[in-house]
C-alpha cells in the first residue's frame, strides 16, 4: 500500500479542525493555519485559496502583512466580484486606522453581497469606521 500524501479535502478538514480547536478567535493557531493553506495552495491552486491564505497571513503577522499578501489578488479576475477580498482589505485597513480607505473597501464589499447577515456585519463595521472620518 502506498501513501499518496494529503488531499485537498484532508487539508481543508485540518484547517477546519484548527479553527474548531481554538477556544476563541484570538486563540486560533494562525501559524498552523498559514502552513496548512500553503499546503492547500500547492494541492489546489485557486484565487480563493490564495485569498484565504492572505487573510491568515494578516492574522498571523498583522494587518500590514495581510494587505501586502492581498495586493497581488486585487487584479485577480476570479475575485472581481468576491466580497471577501474587499471585506478582508477593509478589516486590515480598519485595524491600521486608515479610515478613508477602510470605508471605501467596506462600500465595495457591500456592493458585492446580498447575504443579509454579511451585509449587517459590513454595515456595522462601515459605521464604526465612519465615526473616525469626521
Image: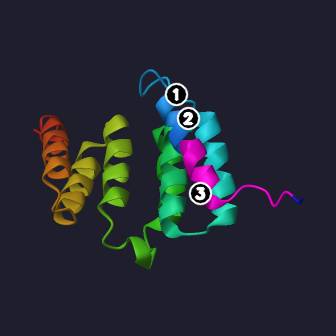
Q: Residues within 10 Å of mark 1 (few under 14, many from 20)?
A: few
Quadrant containing the C terminus in the rendered view: top left
Q: What's the residue at 27%, 48% (across, down)?
A: 102
Q: Nearer the viewer, residue 62 or 133?
A: 62
Q: Which of the 4 quarters of the picture holds residue 107?
A: bottom left
SS class, disc 3 = helix
Residue 114 picture location, percent across and down: 15, 62
Q: Residues within 10 Å of mark 3 (few under 14, many from 20)?
A: few
Residue located farthest toward the bottom when viewing the structure as drawn: 77
Residue 125 picture location, percent across and down: 19, 40
Q: Is residue 1 visible?
A: yes
Q: What's the residue at 62%, 67% (across, down)?
A: 44
Task: Say left or right for 34 vs 1.
Answer: left
Picture layout, residue 47 above or below residue 60: below
Residue 18 badge: 2
Main SS, magenta region, reads: helix
Whether tag 1 and tag 2 are in contact, CB under 8 A, the answer is yes
Q: Residue under circle 1?
A: 21
Q: Nearer the viewer, residue 10 or 79?
A: 10
Magenta-colored span: 3-15
Q: Residues within 10 Å of mark 2 (few under 14, many from 20)?
A: some
Residue 9 badge: 3
Picture layout, residue 40 above or below residue 34: below
Q: Between marks 3 and 1, how big is the CA–CA gap?
A: 18 Å
Dot 3 or dot 2: first in sequence order is 3
Amino acid at each position: 500500500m502506498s501513501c499518496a500524501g494529503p488531499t485537498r479535502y484532508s487539508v481543508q478538514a485540518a484547517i477546519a479542525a484548527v479553527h474548531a480547536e481554538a477556544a476563541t478567535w484570538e486563540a486560533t493557531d494562525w501559524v498552523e493555519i498559514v502552513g496548512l493553506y500553503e499546503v492547500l495552495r500547492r494541492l489546489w491552486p485557486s484565487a480563493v485559496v490564495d485569498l484565504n491564505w492572505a487573510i491568515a497571513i494578516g492574522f498571523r503577522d498583522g494587518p500590514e502583512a495581510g494587505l501586502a499578501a492581498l495586493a497581488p489578488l486585487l487584479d485577480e479576475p476570479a475575485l472581481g466580484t468576491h466580497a471577501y477580498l474587499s471585506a478582508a482589505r477593509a478589516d486590515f485597513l480598519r485595524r491600521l486606522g486608515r479610515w478613508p480607505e477602510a470605508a471605501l473597501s467596506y462600500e465595495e464589499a457591500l456592493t458585492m453581497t446580498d447575504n443579509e447577515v454579511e451585509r449587517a456585519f459590513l454595515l456595522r463595521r462601515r459605521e464604526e469606521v465612519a465615526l473616525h472620518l469626521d
